[in-house]
Image (cartoon, rainbow, N blue to C red):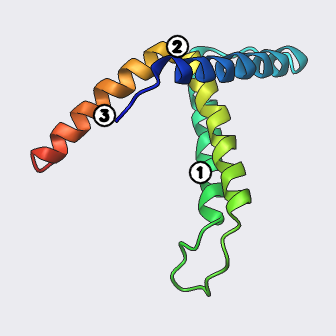
């Protein structure tokens, strides 16, 4: 698998900067003052809400008649989750480079686990 490390990092850095600007705007305009603990709880609750919205876009209720999945709406909900994930990543001190490195390392571990019958 070819990895375009620099290009992905640049795109992720752009997303981080854009999310930082949005976070700072919301915090300033709404005069929000939270501790790290409070931010982690608030953002993870928001992420849980977004996950529920994602789930509502698919046919997970086996007792109901299936509906056609609106892929565009489903993608929008996933992007909403990304907004909160970016905010949380920034709050806990992760940088785009760290995310890439930690992801690559953990991905290797996960493959090793699967190879070992995890």
Q: Secondary structure at mark 1?
A: helix
**Marker disc for residue 70:** none
Judging depth in this view, the residue of 53 and 6 nearest the camera is 6
Q: Is residue 106 left or right of residue 7?
A: left
Mark nearer the viewer, 1 or 2? 2
Taking depth in this image into account, of 39 and 106 the one nearest to the observer is 106
Query: Can the viewer see residue 85 in this picture?
Result: yes
Q: What residue appears at the point 59 percent right and 23 percent down from the top-left corner?
A: 12
Residue at 46%, 20% (x, y): give it. 5
In primary-sequence order, the first of circles 1 and 2 is 1
For the residues carrying marks 1 and 3, which lies nearer the camera in this image?
3
Q: Secondary structure at mark 3?
A: helix
> Residue 109's spot in the image, x, y percent?
22, 32
Label 3 packing within 10 angstroms: few (<14), some (14-19), many (20+): few
Residue 39 visible in the current orientation: no
Look at 18% across and 47% down and name the residue there: 114
- The numbered dot on residue 51 is 1
> Which one is earlier in the sequence, the residue at label 3 or at label 2?
2
Q: First in sequence: mark 1 or mark 3?
A: 1
Q: CA distance from mark 3 to mark 2?
A: 18 Å
Q: Is residue 77 above or below residue 111?
A: below
Judging by the rendered image, the residue that carries numbered circle 2 is 95
- In depth, the one of 27 and 97 nearer the eye is 97
Residue pointed to by mark 3? 107
In-image side of 60 versus 2 (left or right): right
């Amino acid at each position: 698998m070819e990895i375009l490390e620099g290009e992905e990092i640049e795109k992720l850095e752009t997303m981080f900067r854009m999310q930082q600007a949005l976070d700072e705007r919301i915090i300033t305009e709404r005069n929000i003052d939270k501790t790290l603990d409070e931010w982690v709880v608030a953002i993870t609750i928001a992420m849980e809400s977004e996950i529920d919205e994602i789930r509502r876009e698919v046919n997970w209720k086996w007792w109901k008649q299936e509906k056609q999945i609106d892929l565009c709406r489903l993608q929008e909900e996933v992007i909403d989750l990304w907004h909160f994930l970016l905010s949380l990543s920034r709050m806990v001190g992760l940088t785009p480079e760290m995310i890439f490195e930690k992801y690559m390392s953990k991905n290797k571990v996960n493959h090793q686990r699967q190879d070992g019958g995890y």
